[in-house]
Image (tube, rainbow, N blue to C red):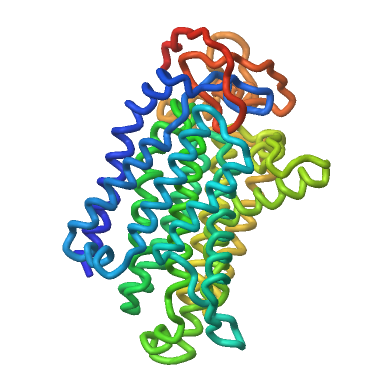
Amino acid sequence: MGQPVREYLLTLCVTAAVTYLLTGPVRKFAIAAGAMPEIRARDVHREPTPRLGGIAMFGGLCAGLLVASHLTNLKSVFENSDEPRALLSGAALIWLLGVLDDKWGVDALVKLGGQMIAAGVMVLQGLTILWIPIPGVGTVSLTPMQGTLLTVALVVITINAVNFVDGLDGLASGMVCIAAAAFFMYAYRMWFGYGIEAAAPATLFSVVLMGMCLGFLPHNMHPARIFMGDSGSMLIGLVMAAGAVSVTGQVDPDLLNVKAGGLREATHAMVPVYIPLLLPLTVIAVPVADLILAIVRRTWKGQSPFAADRGHLHHRLLEIGHSHSRAVLIMYFWSALIAFGAVAYSANNASMWIVLGIVLLSAVGLVLLLLPRFTPRTPRWAEWMVPPRYRRVSRATGPEVPAAEWDEEEGGVGPQEEREPVPAGINGATAIGDRSRFVEHRRADSHH
């Protein structure tokens, strides 16, 4: 058991290292290529920032799969299944579409069609939902058409959910990393806990996805030096969806009945898989909720569901007074609570302690949401160890600056602040939106 863990750890480290090392050169390439639109009033960052970070993430994906294919235990995934090849084919298509969108802009319907084509390519190579285990009915086999439609729908929903939540520095990559970690725990238990080989590809996909996000996060944390853009957000969304399709649509529940030692044990083990969309939706519950609310909100106003606005969950957190960093951490908290709570419940759904723990942590999360202006203060003897906004003394010799204004100086954006579009210069791009039409270039600020 120890050796596969070491191989997973090696794959994770290689993927993260390659992604991290490529991000710097990719940033310079994005600046030179002019992939940097103007800042609009609905954006939350204050200066243009380059995107195309998905190029580095795709490089990490390829490196991780290449290394895993030569490891003693993980190479069996490539020998016994075509799913890694299917993932790489679909990822290449969605990544290319994202790169084109980051540089020149692609119509929303064209992007939707490209996402469906990428999902269809994966289906043609065997990465598809084969059956649905339904409580009280049993395992329901799907026709090829039904499996294809359900798989494409799941992939498109996941891609757009991740793309919609990509609005703050480090938000999308951090939330997807949390979801991938929870998914890895579940898939690893299915593979090595019950010896079900069909769960092996999903375990590998989750590890590679974690490495992609961890390698990109240091460059993307607030204040971000580069954005992943659509080339990155759609890519990690597709990888997450591929793992969800693999583990929920191809693991035979009847086989688990035998491995688990009986129907009762198998029932407890397969709680999140009774409905194949349940576990994927729990690990990306926050992005999916944001996606649904955005569609309802825009349709209610008579707008296109693809029309960008400033009404996402992370925008709401900023409006009620949370700083940029705190809004991201709150979103992390809820993502981790829902994802790991679902995995813990699937492992032991007979324990009331798990349910009570989830309820207690949910109450803590609600308290954090209701205290946007609360800023903890550290003892004076420890002030040198923490950022200035957590110190009791003022930041300068003048009058003490309120905590809310400190957040503004740290890069947060007030709820009522209105800004004129800023021409994109040497520093970069927004994550989503129209491209800059300015041709002049300015010198990068000294802090970059």
User: As drawn, is 397 to the left or to the right of 11?
Assistant: right
Q: Quadrant of residue 149?
A: bottom right
The percent position of residue 266, horizontal first and vertical second, equals 46, 85
Q: In the picture, which quadrant includes the C terminus?
A: top left
The percent position of residue 180, horizontal first and vertical second, equals 43, 55
Q: Nearer the viewer, residue 391 or 307?
A: 307
User: As drawn, is 303 to the left or to the right of 340?
Assistant: right
Is residue 145 among what the camera can see? Answer: yes
Q: How many marks?
A: 0
- Residue at 52% x, 34% y: name it: 101
User: As drawn, is 298 to the left or to the right of 122?
Assistant: right
Tell me if residue 348 comes above or below residue 118 in the rendering: below
Q: Nearer the viewer, residue 179 or 64?
A: 64
Q: In the picture, which quadrant includes the N terminus?
A: bottom left
- Residue at 32% x, 40% y: name it: 59
Tell me if residue 386 comes above or below residue 147 in the rendering: above
Tell me if residue 260 comes above or below residue 81 in the rendering: below
Q: Nearer the viewer, residue 262 or 390?
A: 262
